[in-house]
Amino acid sequence: MPNLPTLIRPSQTLAAYTSFKVGGSAEFFAAPRNLSELQAAIAWAKAQNLKITCLGAGSNLLISDRGLTGLVICTKYLRGISFDREKGQVYAMAGESGVSLARQVAAKGWSGLEWAIGIPGSVGGLVVMNAGAQGGCTADCLIETEVFSLSENSSQLLRVPDLDYQYRSSNLQNSDRLVLKATLQLTPDQDPTVISAKTSSFLRQRQTTQPYHLPSCGSVFRNPQPQIIPQSAGQLIEATGLKGFQVGRAQVAELHANFILNLGGATASDIFRLITHVQTEVEQKWGIRLEPEVKMLGFA
């Protein structure tokens, strides 16, 4: 395809754009740094009749070794944060790191986002997944989010009731709507030392109970509904005897069984096969099929 716009790159390897550090190449790739570039990339793909796939921080994602056809748009460089002290609200672009945002608001003495310190995703990912930890989640503090519909080629503001939030899910998942920015309601004018200390304690707790020393996607499986199965996904996997089990260079973590690690040199196929093996073994032993939390692209 001759005369590609400067923003569009052909045959871009995607492994560097996922926390698993695996995956094939995008047929075409764009990493816009503002909304104008994003709209230009979308317009180009539509003019070429190409499928569009959007990536955020890639922290909850497994891309096949075959890669992805069409245009892959990475939104991790859509950044910007502003504060409204009078309202106690933070306005954050989708590409902002949730960890970085948690640190910044804590340093200002704003409370309400301490739980996000250990979640390695973007603001857009937090909104889409209703991400949570330490008893808090996105739904607790989100006021509204601006999304862009690829099919309608327009943006709209959605409030929390519009998102059908449930545990680690929203109606933005598996839709053509792309998160652009989020408005969060926090509590300003707190003691920065106290808020920062609480935030740091949450991070230390996660670092001592979860393996962050090797590439992973965080928790691989959603926890079952507690009223049906009281055990977490990690407890079920551990009780099945799968801690340390490997497929190729992919391993169920010894420290936390709901993590799969890239020991170095793993392929997306290794990880996918290990996910499938864990599902099969847990289902055979406990009669429940674990549902992946990680989004898997290019495997169908």
Image (cartoon, rainbow, N blue to C red):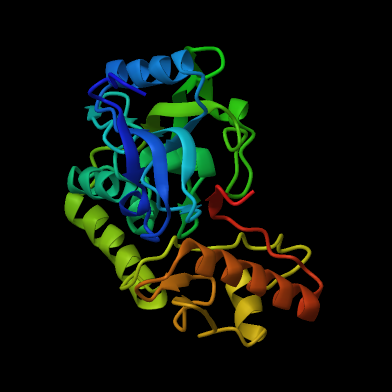
* Residue 197, image x, y percentages: 23, 61
User: Dividing the image into 4 quarters, which one contains the N terminus?
Assistant: top left
Image quarter of residue 33: top left
Image quarter of residue 237: bottom right
Residue 74 visible within the image? no
Residue 289 horizontal side relative to residue 89, left or right? right
State the residue at coordinates (76%, 73%): 283
Say which of 246 and 78 sits in front: 246
State the residue at coordinates (72%, 72%): 280
In the displayed structure, 19 sits above or below 154; it is below
Residue 33 horizontal side relative to residue 133, left or right? left
* Residue 40, image x, y percentages: 34, 16
State the residue at coordinates (44%, 77%): 249
In the displayed structure, 277 sits above or below 268; it is below
Residue 68 horizontal side relative to residue 100, left or right? right
* Residue 149, image x, y percentages: 52, 19
Residue 208 horizontal side relative to residue 168, left or right? left
